[in-house]
Amino acid sequence: MKELPDTPSLAFFKADAKILHKKAAALTRLESQHAREVRSVNYTTCLESLASGYGSTYRSIAFEERLISKYISHSFKKGFWKNPFDGSYQRGRFLLQFDAIVETLRDGVPLAKAAERREIDFAKFHFSNLLFSKVSTVLSIKKLPDFSRIEAPGSLIESSWLQDVESLSEANFKDAKFYNITCDPIVRPGVNCYRADFSGADLRGADFRDSYLRGSFFKRALLEGADFRNSNIYECNFTGAKGQFVTGFVENSEWFVEPVKKHKAY
């Protein structure tokens, strides 16, 4: 697989491993000062240790995230996205975003309110499976966030984050990209949102290709340039929606990305 930039999610994982490695190195130095024999811990061990806490291996994590990176590059180069996903990892900002997510999952407050308290938004954020795993090390996820009024333009969102979520009204998902990963694994566009409420949301330029949206509400939503091709929009309510969007069924074999060979994880 051609070398591609790390996704923001893989970047935060590696950053956590580097911090763990520094702590391990400091502990090794401390023990050596007391004439104790200790085995030094390398960075690779820290990557695997973190991955184990996520219930996975680093090779599996890196494989999935790099496949997503390939999908990002492919979707833009093929013209499926007008604008690329160019989100990046910034640790200070990410920690505030992560705290907001933990608060909303723990206390049931809307994610927009938790973000507002920290004076941050989720523009160009990567809502990934790996992020789910990180959250799961802190608390048990029983219910997904209330995304109403969230500011997340240009974000990249894995389908699991919106599975059975109903509250998305007045959210800003302008130019957002929705995708999912199959067990094959294949990365493909789409999200499953049965009877979700996107009323008043800004969905201009959003990528909803290959989505299941049956019975969802798009009342008063801004939909200019949104792509609903090959999506199930049966029984959806578009009353008062504004802007021209794309629908219909087309040949879609080039929409998917799958691995072609094994890669070097480290």
Image (cartoon, rainbow, N blue to C red):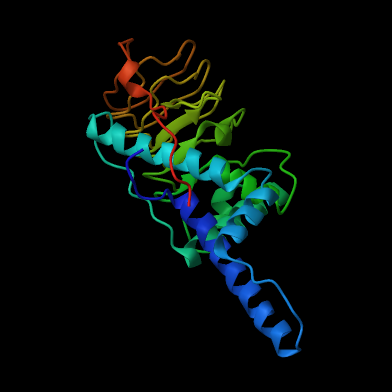
Question: Count the marks: how many?
Answer: 0
Image x and y of residue 174, in percent: 36, 39
Q: Nearer the viewer, residue 61 or 236?
A: 61
Q: Nearer the viewer, residue 115 or 231?
A: 231
Q: Is residue 32 above or below residue 64?
A: below
Q: Is residue 178 visible?
A: yes
Is 138 situated left or right of 212 in this image?
right
Residue 59, how many percent across, how many down? 54, 44
> Quarter-wise, where is residue 39 in the image?
bottom right
49 relative position to 202: left or right:
right
Query: Which residue does the image show at 32% across and 34% down from the upper left?
Result: 204
Q: Quadrant of the N terminus?
A: top left
In this rendering, is residue 65 above or below 11? Answer: above
Residue 198 appears in the rendering: no
- Give how far across and how far down residue 166 sits, in percent: 59, 30
- Image coordinates of residue 165 in percent, x first then y, are 60, 32
Q: Residue at x 29, y 23 (%)?
A: 245
Q: Residue at x 41, y 31 (%)?
A: 261
**Residue in front for this viewpoint, 184 or 240:** 184
